[in-house]
Amino acid sequence: MAKATIGRCILGILALFFMGTGLVLMISPSVMLAHTFIGPIDSVSGLSSIRSLWGGTTIAIWAMVLLGAIRYNVDYIMVGFIALMLVLVGRLVGYFIDGSYPELIPTVVPTIVATVIMIIACKLMAHTTDA
């Protein structure tokens, strides 16, 4: 299997994982919120916002990454990379403005791991032939 194909498969799997996360946020936000260190949302409008803004946006971003992997187009994949970078920036802004909190490392590590996986997959995609 060519390195480029492996990179595309890795990106596809990562995109499907995040799209699944977005789908869970849409269908059952309270289940997902328990895993994100966010307390329960009691209002219908709050749940609707979680479903649309977090679930819908997550699915849209990672659908672009999946499309990029399928079409072999790094421009689409950059949407996911930029989204991950901004999640990391948001965590760091919160750290510097709000102060340290015990869940900082558990919330930052998955973002960093996903970013590293994306970088490796994109590097593999850049190979048109096996070396």
Image (cartoon, helix red, strand yellow):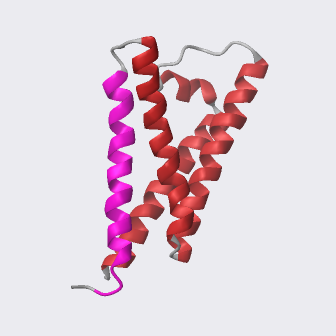
Residue lying at the far right of the rendered structure: 45
Residue 4, image x and y in percent?
37, 77
Is 52 within the magenta?
no
Displayed quadrant of residue 128: bottom left
Q: Quadrant of the C terminus?
A: bottom left
Q: Is residue 27 above or below residue 63?
A: above
Residue 127 falls inside the magenta stretch: yes
Give the vertical position of 21 relative to 42 (above or below): below
- Percent position (x, y) of residue 108? 36, 32
Q: Position of residue 39 (x, y in %)?
A: 55, 14
The residue sitting at 37% across, 69% down in the picture is: 7
Would residue 118 appear left or right of 65 to someone viewing this image? left
| x 60%, y 60%: residue | 64
- In the depicted structure, whether residue 122 falls above or below residue 88: below
- Depth order, front residue of 17/60: 60
- Quadrant of the image containing the N terminus: bottom left
What segment is highlighted magenta in the picture?
Answer: 104-129
Occupied quadrant, residue 105: top left
